[in-house]
Image (spheres, helix red, strand yellow):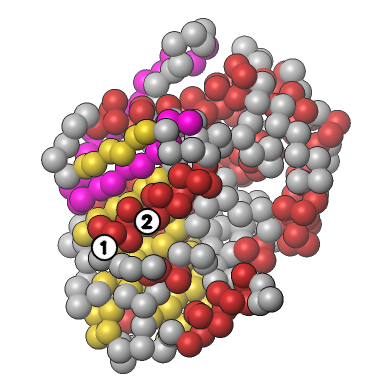
Amino acid sequence: MIGLSLLMAVVWTISRATEQVVLYPSVDQFGKPIELSGRLTAPADSARGIMLLLHGTHTANNEAPSNKPMYEERWFGKDYVLVMPDYMGYGATQDSIHPYLCGEFTARHCVDMLLAVRPMLDTMAVKIETDSIIIFGFSQGGATAVWCLKLLEERYAEQLPVKACYAGGGPYDVASEFDHCVQKNKTGMPVTIPMLVLGTDMAYQLGLDTKDYFTKATEKIDKRFVREKKQGFVSVWFRTPVHLLSHWLSKKGRDKSQPATQRIYEGLLRSSLVHYPIDDHPVGQEIICPSWRPKAKTYIFHSTNDNVVGFHNSEHLRRCWGELENVRYEFDKFGSHMKSYQRFSKTACKELGIGE
């Protein structure tokens, strides 16, 4: 029996005329030049447009688009030029910490890839019907999709016009997600907690001491993180898939009255596209609702019983945006995070006129 990864690779190889790993310029958390990576693919003859395809949470470098075909390529690769950023911390920058869920930061890196590859497309043999961009992402990719839409519409509306954005199951309110995890002493995906603390520290240059946050189960995590990500991070961390937050974060790390934890929480607020405090939480009553509203057609999807990314994230987004003619929300009990991903993807394919 052919393995899934091998089968995907075979399908991908026979349906592409152009594919290449792209190295492109951007800036790091200090504003210094860095070289990031991603992958670009194009159909053999013509493409309906350009798609910015954004991946969800990765815990190993070998999962990055420059190292492995994305699952969604089997749907979109025959019709669109696909631009797939690795994100900082993967691919060419695998030796660094990934700024996990720091949406504005990651969006900047993704848009930089669009800017870098746009001139390349003019030299390719493939005919592109329209310059307008489709954005697609689920989970971390869903939040990144909306951050990218915001950046593109605010700064690159004429240069990189967006036709539509499909965002599913995204953590748009990172601070509120942290609050829910603290209240329930539970996290849907254990590895994301150390990723979130380390990534927030790195992106905003907080200079945190990991001893203020982590339990002995995650001691010296800052040194282990990069090494194990390069070696196959997911296999190491999910040997102990403990969903209790207290297994990963110390009592001090879960207490927002502590100065050290207040600092990380301020970073989480900066990473939140929107933020509304949960009703019964006494600390952190900040409200974030930016004036920006999407102009492109936007589809926001979330399962109300999602077991990984809380539904309140999309609920808060709708609360901020309100009802807009160009924005469609689809919320219902669609099942678990991964089960709902299947419905989200099928809906996007149907709206884009793509058959499986």
Which kind of residue does numbered mark 2 sit on?
Answer: Lys
Where does the N terminus fall, quadrant-wise? bottom right
- Residue 266, above or below 238: above
Q: Is mark 1 on a helix, strand or loop?
A: loop
Along the polypeptide, which appears first: circle 1 or circle 2? 2
* Rendering coords of residue 316 (x, y %): 36, 27
Magenta residue span: 283-305
Nearer to me, 174 or 138: 138
- Residue 141, above or below 245: below
* Rendering coords of residue 137 (x, y %): 42, 53
Q: Which-is-in-front pick, marks 1 and 2?
A: 2
Where does the C terminus fall, quadrant-wise? bottom left
Magenta includes 302?
yes
Q: In this view, does 315 lie to the left or right of 55?
A: left
Q: What element carries label 2?
A: helix
* Mark 2 surroundings within 10 Å by alpha-carbon count, few (fewer than 14), some (14 through 19), many (20 or more): some
Magenta includes 315?
no
* Rendering coords of residue 135 (x, y %): 33, 58
Q: Is residue 48 visible?
A: yes
Residue matched to label 2: 346
Nearer to me, 18 or 204: 18
Q: Residue at x 48, y 87 (%)?
A: 14
* Snapshot quadrant of residue 181: top right
Residue matched to label 1: 352
Q: Can residue 119 be seen in this view?
A: no
